[in-house]
Amino acid sequence: MLKQKKIINLVTMILSTVLLILLILGIMQCYKINKKYPSPTVMAVDISQELLINDNNLKVKATEFEVKEIDDLLPDHSIPFDYNANSKIAIVKLNVKNVSDNNESFDLTSLVLTTNGWKNGLFLDLFMKLNPDYYSVINPDESIDIIVPYAMLDYQFEKSIWEKINEQHFRIVFQVYPENKLSLIHISEPTRR
């Protein structure tokens, strides 16, 4: 009986030591990864302020932001969409300028609009309708203006947020890593005279 207790204690001690070694190795691996890939720095600007993206080859700025009803943009319902859903379209107008000596590509698919934990990529079908002449390659010293739409559906938000969606502060994210580059945007209040 005493011999059996000693064996159980020895096995317990060996297992505890192995688990402790694995835990230490796991912590060391997390530290190594976090040191190699640290948290991104955040560079945020307000609407109408420029940001350098694409290895500082493109200057981008959000010039206008508004939230519209889908029927205001597509009264003919010419794009596949659930027109019966309680939805709105966020519209961000961007100016993108190539400040390099080479042709630069502007990646629309990486643009994300966020607010209060919600995020969405662009509404591509509507983007193509609003920007029929868009070409993603921008020549040196060329500047383009584009309209970037984002679909927002009521069930994606808490009811209290949806009811005040026009008062929310949004962010359009241009780049996530190694620098998180974004523009803080919201619907500006009408000027009072």
Image: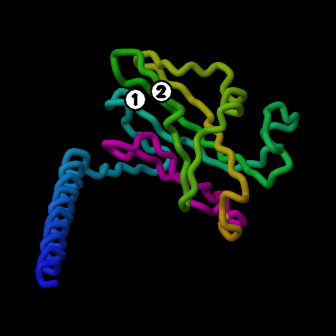
| Mark 2: amino acid | Phe
Residue 192 makes an appearance in the image: no
Residue range in magenta is 162-190
Position of 130 compared to 73: left or right?
Answer: left
- Report the mark closest to the observer, 1 or 2: 2
Q: Residue 137, percent across and down?
A: 49, 18
What residue is rendered at 53% in x and 32% in y?
A: 108
Residue for badge 1? 58
Position of 99 compared to 33: left or right?
Answer: right
Up/down of 5 relative to 165, above or below: below
Q: Residue 41, percent across and down?
A: 30, 50
What residue is rendered at 54% in x and 36% in y?
A: 94
**CB-based contact (under 8 Å), mark 1 and mark 2:** yes
Up/down of 152 relative to 129, above or below: below
Q: Which of the two labelled residues, at mark 1 and mark 2, occupies the earlier sequence position? A: 1
The quarter holding residue 98 reads top left
